[in-house]
Amino acid sequence: MPTDVLSPDAVARIARLKGRIPEGFQPREWVVRTPAGEHPVPPAVQALLAVVWPSWQRLATDDEFGWEVHLPSHCEVEAGLVEEETPRAWYAIGWDEGQWYLVVDLADTDGDFRVHRVDHEGGDRVGTGRRLSTLLAELRPVGDHFDFPDAGAEADSPPSAREPAVDAHTLVHADPDELLPLLDHVTSAEGRLAADVYRTSADRHRRGDAVTRRQLLAMDAARLGAGDLARAVAAVPVAGAPADTWTVEWATGARLDPQVRARFDVGGRQVTAVVQGRPVLVTLSGYTLYVHDLVTGAVVVEADLKSKVHQEFQALAVTEADGRWIAVTGAECMGACHGYGDDDGCGGRCGGLVERWNLADGTPVGDPLTGSLGSVKAVAVARVAGEQVVVGGGGDRTLRMWDLRTGAPLGDPIAERPDIDEPGAIRAIAVGEAAGRPIAITGAEDGAGLVWDLESGGTLGAALTTDDPDRVDAWISSAAVGCLDGRPTVVTSGDDEVRLWDPLTGEQVGDVLTDDHGDVNGKSALAELDGRSVVVTARHGVVSVWDPRDRRVVRGPVSLFADSGGSVDSLTTAVVAGRPVALVGTYRHTFVVDLDVASTTLQGPRRGHTEKIRDMAAGETDSGAYLVTGGEDGTARVWDLADGTELCAALDGHRVRVNVAATRLGDRPAAVTTDGEKLRVWDPSTGELTRTVAAKRRGDGHELMSVSATEHGGRAIGLTAGYDGRVLAWDLEKGAPAGLPPLTGHPDYIRAALPMTVDGRGVVAVNDHDAVRIWDLESGGTTRILRHEREVDRLAVVASSARPLVITACHDALHVWDPATGEHLGSVDTGDTIRAMSAAEIDGRPLVATGGYKRTVRLWDAATCEQVGSTLTVPEETGALALTPGGRLAVAFGADIALLSRGVADGGA
């Protein structure tokens, strides 16, 4: 695309809309008639008029009107179309469905020229107009076609043609959309390990450049135990970029599993389909409709529905009708939806909405389906008497049906469970066939399921329920219909059990499927594995595959990443490259799990935390340096910095997330942990618990939020910051209060209290919302107050004997303070919301490490407020950081840790 005539912003907007300028385009001598006389057409305007869109695509305004826009569509402009005293060189470059011309002044030769919208009847005055790039940003592509990326070699080509190279250079530089589909054809053990490494953070590095990909691949190789591959990847040169200043020494892969083929950063209501021969995942996340190509992982549709509806989506189904793919949604109306009368919306009168959308572009198809369901919690599409029918259920406890094509209601609403007075709302609908008849299975909040004959509107058999008194409060949140050994079978879940049923009799088939991963929001689905029907369950981040005949787990369990968001919102299955997969959706993410993997490529045993790491501290034993980490799994762990091995068993016994510190008791190393109530002191070499302090006492209210440690007056002192706004000091050797005055007067909870020495006296820097207070540890008096303009999110100190420093983080800004004078020494915008921070003096240089919301880690010189070395990208959001002895950096992300060292490029060791 000729970027020398169009602005980079305009070029990018055209590419986003899938437009192109024909190869070989060159501006020509072109003069047209205008109200100001004949005028040449500028090169930028000629370039726009040469743009070609895909034949299947149209353009529309991305607003509530969705007007079709014809651009380019050019013609001369007659005098009088624009009301003005002195005519200008107007020329029309397009028009929209609202009967407005899009005109430009040919005297505007800018590469991002202004476009004006004037009424076709003329007589309009024009304002300043909009830049071309702005106009293009307000458009979206519409059409019935899905633009899938190239999936690589054809399936019927010989294996040698399909198997890709997976050397380090290819992994770093290949186009992810081209390489990912080919990884299923890798056959060697070394190649399969490289493929697993590549897939681990593909959702991150596919959107980044080669430098980002190199960093993530090196780290993921270390997480999967492939040290040689990690080093090879890190050594791959990238044109125009310096060698990476970070080297991964070791990393943990506590919850990594190669069966997790991919992860998408969306979650919500989800279904799968095969569109144009490609398996896809359709997700309704908030107000956005996504279609992911499961072969490449690419997003092929991203449509914002918010401008068209004012409702909370709660249900989703997809189907193909008359050659077009349709998404059907169910929602709770928020009182401002359109299509039910006046322009001000329904005022909540409709209760709930069922709507149809073009899956390819997110445009509405017809009017909303009429008939209140209250809050629509479940929808499905069935075939009844040869016609496609929308089936919906929700808060009014009835089942309703509509003709998919016409939107006409079919029959009267069917009352859910007419045999009881207070049936629960319908939360799940699955459709299928039994005994040659179309059926729907509904699951309700009262814990019972019903099987409906969609042709007659009556029920088949008895309700799918048990007489178990322990299940009176259970509800059914998912249901699936399939075939087991030639017989129709229904699988339901919603409490901590999965049950199979005969839909014709209503009888339960065999015992329940249950394990120790109970989750009230657990889901179940049916799939086929090795030619046999299996049940897939996803509960509390754990995926298992069951043989329903003997209630045995035959694949898994597969643990998802530590930041999966807890409960499972959706579960569906698909077949990708001939392999069955499960799609597990949580609030924030979707995981693609390979169900046909009996073995793993993980190198060595898994180790580490099972939930997020939230705190870290570095210390030293007689044999070397160590790292102690505290996690949300209620454990602390101690790591040998030399090789990443655990020095002892997990330090357990904590009730909730653990905060940590490292210190010494005389000549012995000590790790200190808290869990909100108790202060525990451990020997980091052996894992022996040596002291326990009941820091939160009956009636005292000092619930611990953080812990730090220092030496004061020849004693090892632990400092606890509490939710009660106090900082208390404890003698770690005696396991008792240290006799120092409490630091009080803070209005609310304290996030951190960090000790340091200033002018020869022991002080404590305390995070106090929009200020940091410096307290004298011996007297309990305030020496300085470092006031900020906004809340202080993170606090760190550089305990330098030459010049101690206090470092604060406010959102994305880093501030440096002198605690002796209270002087603000400098600040820097880090470019990312700071979620973790650590500071230390390394080789006489005050350094600060920051970890951001965008999964970046940066190192800063606190003396100059300048960045040191390159930015590091990590696989997950940073939970904790620790600058360790020798200048190495420990980074905690999710449940894992990576230890990195700096190269000579930035002056590191």
Image: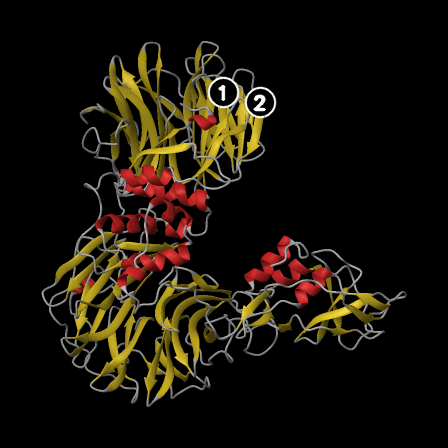
Taking the spot 37% from the left edge, 16% from the top edge, the residue there is 740
Marker disc for residue 825: 2
> Is residue 96 left or right of 847 when viewed as pictured?
right
Residue that carries the numbered disc 1 in the rendered image:
805
Residue 472 against residue 848 in the figure, above or below: below
Q: Position of residue 549 (x, y in %)?
A: 11, 68
The N terminus appears in which quarter of the rendering?
bottom right
> Is residue 708 left or right of 21 when viewed as pictured?
left
Q: Position of residue 168 (x, y in %)?
A: 34, 44
Q: Nearer the viewer, residue 764 or 846?
A: 846
Q: Are marks 1 and 2 in contact (CB under 8 Å)?
A: yes
Q: Position of residue 376 (x, y in %)?
A: 40, 72
- Callout 1 amino acid: Leu
Taking the spot 34% from the left edge, 31% from the top edge, the residue there is 616
The C terminus appears in which quarter of the rendering?
top left
Confirm whether residue 698 shows in the render: no
Tag 1 secondary structure: strand
